[in-house]
Amino acid sequence: MSDSGIGAVTAVDPVGSVTAWSPIYGEARDSVYELAEAMTADNFGALLIRMRDDHVAIVTERDIVHTVAAGTEGQDWAADVMTREVLSVSAETSIAEVAELMLDANIRHMLVTDNNGDRMGIASIRDLVGPLLVSAG
């Protein structure tokens, strides 16, 4: 396997090295349509919802697809479809460990926090594939 030019990031490297540190945010009162528009405009597969208690919830492309399949898109709000119990890892957690956690939880996006808990980002399964393949090769 040849190097793709993205550097030598491998499965043992910290997930912070592939995390999107500028996630997009929505509001609990945003419609599913508004969330889909924001995700499409910024080419993100998930966005975060700030909660009143300083926690975050997440809405993913999968949540929106389920809403569309139910035939209620446009009538549902972020608060109706978001995941409130968001799994998170430290930015220092290895890419391989995050991939395993995502597989076990059947999720495609993981909240990543820096060492101080000051900064949040999102790592998607797509972000992990390249380093995992480099390690396998």
Image (spheres, rainbow, N blue to C red):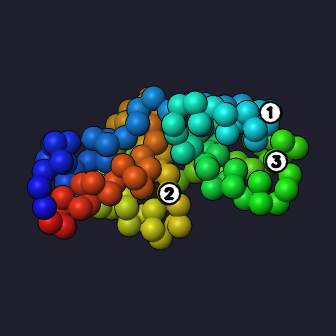
Q: Position of residue 133 (x, y in %)?
A: 23, 61
Q: Residue at x 37, y 40 (%)?
A: 19
User: How far apart in space, not on screen, are marks 3 and 1 (Cα)?
Assistant: 14 Å
Q: Earlier in the sequence, mark 1 or mark 2?
A: 1
Judging by the rendered image, the residue that carries numbered circle 1 is: 29
Q: Position of residue 132 (x, y in %)?
A: 26, 60
Q: Secondary structure at mark 1?
A: loop
Q: Residue at x 61, y 49 (%)?
A: 60
Q: Dot 2, crowdedness within 10 Å: few (<14), some or many (≥20)?
A: some
Q: Position of residue 29 (x, y in %)?
A: 80, 33
Q: Earlier in the sequence, mark 3 or mark 2?
A: 3
Type of the residue with mark 3: Glu
Relative vertical location of residue 78 with respect to residue 101 in this rendering, above or below: above
Judging by the rendered image, the residue that carries numbered circle 3 is: 73
Q: Is residue 45 left or right of residue 22?
A: right
Type of the residue with mark 1: Arg
- The answer to the question of whether label 3 and label 2 lie on touching residues, with beta carbons closer than 8 A, is no
- Image depth: mark 3 or mark 2 in front: 3
Does the rendering let one see residue 84? no
- Image depth: mark 3 or mark 1 in front: 3
Judging by the rendered image, the residue that carries numbered circle 2 is: 108
Q: Quadrant of the C terminus?
A: bottom left
